[in-house]
C-alpha cells in the first residue's frame, strides 16, 4: 500500500480490498484458517475500537502452547519483551539479536517460539502465521524494550534501532508492515492523527504494526526517543511512551523534545486500582490520560488488567465505568472471558457507546 494523503482515501482503498478479498468477520479464508474477530469492525478507524490484547504473550502461563495458541483464536495483539542480556543466552547476550525474556534469569526466557528464545525466532513464527493468512485482521506486535540500546550503529552485529528495523524487515515485507511515515503521509504523525484519525480495520487487513514500549518515566521514554531520533521516517515501528498525567498527553511525553514528540501518537499505561504509587500509574477514576488521549485520536494500551471490572473501567462499557476509551486492553489470559476466575476481559467493541 502506498502513502495515503487522507483517511477517506484509505477507507476507500480498504473497502475495495475487503470486497475483493471476500472475507467477513470470523469466517475461514481460502487457506482454511479462521480469523478471530469478535465483531466486524468494517471501516471503523482504530481510535474508535477497543480490543482484547495479550500481555507478555511469550511468558509461561500466558499462552496455551506457543504464540500461535493465542494469536488468532483469542487476539491479534501480542507482546514480546526484549533484553540484551540474559543468563539464558550464551555469554549473556546474542550478537545483533535480543533475548525474549521478562528479566535476566534463564527461567524467564520464552518457550513460546519454536526453535529458540530470540527476537528473530519469534519474528519467524509471526511471519509464518502472517503468510498463511494474508488477509488477517491487523496484527499488532508490542515490543517492550527492557534495556537501553547497545549503541546507535547501523550494523548487523549491534543491538541498535537500525538492527531492530533490519530484523523486522528480514521477516516482513515493506508492504506488510504499517510504518509511522505511511500514516503520517509527509506530515507530523501526531498532527495528522489529531486531524484525520487512524486507518480503518478494513483498510489494514493483512498488515502488521510494530509498537515499541519501554519502562515508565524518563528511563523508558529516553529509549523510545533514541529510536525515533535514529530512524525518523525510516522507522518500521511506532513508539508508545508512558505518561503519569494527562499533561504528558496534551504536551510532550515525559523527557521528549519537540521533534521526537511529533512521532508520539500512541500511549502505553499501566492500570492500577485503588492505592499505589509509581510514575507509570493509571489509577482507576483518576486516570485522565486515557480519555484525554482518546479525545485527540491517539491510541492507548493499558496493561496489568487483573479482572473484568478493570477491563470494564478501562473501556468505559455502557453498564459501568467512567474512565475509559482505551484501545488495547492487555490481559494475561486472553482466552478467558470477562469475569472468568477473576481474570479475562470483555469482548471487543466500538466507540462511542
Image (cartoon, grey):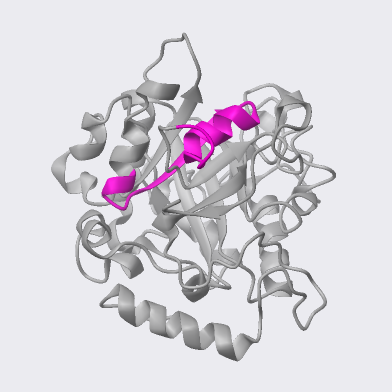
**Range of the magenta residues?**
294-321
Comparing 201 with 106, the one in front is 201
**Looking at the image, which residue sits at the far bottom?**
20
> What residue appears at the point 40 percent right and 14 percent down from the top-left corner?
278
Residue farthest to the front? Answer: 319
Q: Is residue 253 left or right of residue 130?
A: left
Question: Is 266 located above or below residue 192 in the figure?
Answer: above
The outermost residue toward the left is: 258
Membership of 128 in magenta stretch: no
Residue 284 shows in the view: yes
Residue at 76 percent of width and 39 percent of height = 336
The x and y percentages for residue 77 are 60, 51
For this rendering, which residue is in front, 178 or 16? 16
In the image, what residue occupies the spot 33% across and 66% down? Answer: 183
Q: Quadrant of the N terminus?
A: bottom left
Image position of 143 with respect to 7: above or below: above
Nearer to me, 141 or 295: 295
Locate residue 314, reporting x and y percent.
48, 35
* Whether residue 226 is visible: no
Residue 256, quarter of the rendered image = top left
Q: Residue at x 71, y 62 (%)?
A: 36
Q: Is residue 240 above or below residue 7?
A: above
Q: Give how far across and how far down residue 75 sits, in percent.
A: 67, 52
Which picture quadrant has residue 111?
top right
Amino acid at each position: 500500500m502506498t502513502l495515503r494523503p487522507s483517511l477517506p482515501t484509505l477507507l476507500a482503498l480498504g473497502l475495495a480490498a475487503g470486497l475483493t478479498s471476500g472475507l467477513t468477520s470470523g469466517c475461514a479464508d481460502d487457506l482454511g484458517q479462521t480469523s478471530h474477530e469478535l465483531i466486524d469492525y468494517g471501516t471503523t478507524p482504530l481510535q474508535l475500537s477497543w480490543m482484547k490484547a495479550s500481555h507478555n504473550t511469550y511468558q509461561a502461563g500466558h499462552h496455551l502452547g506457543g504464540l500461535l495458541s493465542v494469536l488468532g483464536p483469542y487476539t491479534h495483539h501480542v507482546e514480546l519483551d526484549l533484553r540484551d542480556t540474559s543468563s539464558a543466552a550464551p555469554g549473556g547476550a546474542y550478537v545483533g539479536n535480543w533475548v525474549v525474556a521478562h528479566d535476566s534469569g534463564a527461567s524467564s526466557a520464552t518457550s513460546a517460539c519454536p526453535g529458540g528464545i530470540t527476537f528473530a525466532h519469534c519474528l519467524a513464527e509471526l511471519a509464518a502465521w502472517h503468510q498463511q493468512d494474508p488477509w488477517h485482521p491487523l496484527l499488532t506486535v508490542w515490543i517492550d524494550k527492557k534495556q537501553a540500546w547497545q549503541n546507535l550503529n547501523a550494523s548487523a552485529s549491534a543491538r541498535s534501532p537500525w538492527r531492530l528495523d533490519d530484523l523486522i524487515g528480514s521477516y516482513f515485507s515493506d508492504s506488510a508492515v504499517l510504518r509511522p511515515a505511511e500514516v503520517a503521509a509527509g506530515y507530523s504523525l501526531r498532527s495528522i492523527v489529531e486531524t484525520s484519525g487512524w486507518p480503518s480495520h478494513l483498510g489494514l487487513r493483512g498488515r502488521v504494526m510494530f509498537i515499541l514500549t519501554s519502562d515508565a518515566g524518563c528511563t523508558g521514554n529516553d529509549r523510545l526517543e533514541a529510536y525515533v531520533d535514529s530512524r525518523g521516517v525510516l522507522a518500521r515501528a511506532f513508539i508508545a511512551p508512558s505518561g503519569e498525567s494527562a499533561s504528558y498527553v496534551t504536551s510532550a511525553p515525559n523527557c521528549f523534545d519537540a521533534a521526537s514528540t511529533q512521532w508520539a501518537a500512541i500511549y502505553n499505561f499501566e492500570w492500577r486500582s485503588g492505592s499505589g504509587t509509581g510514575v507509570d500509574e493509571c489509577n482507576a477514576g483518576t486516570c485522565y490520560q486515557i480519555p484525554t488521549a482518546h479525545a485527540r485520536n491517539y491510541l492507548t494500551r493499558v496493561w496489568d488488567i487483573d479482572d473484568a471490572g478493570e477491563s470494564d473501567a478501562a473501556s468505559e462499557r455502557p453498564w459501568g465505568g467512567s474512565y475509559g476509551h482505551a484501545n488495547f486492553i492487555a490481559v494475561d489470559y486472553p482466552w478467558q472471558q470477562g469475569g472468568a476466575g477473576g481474570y479475562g476481559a470483555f469482548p471487543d467493541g466500538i466507540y462511542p457507546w
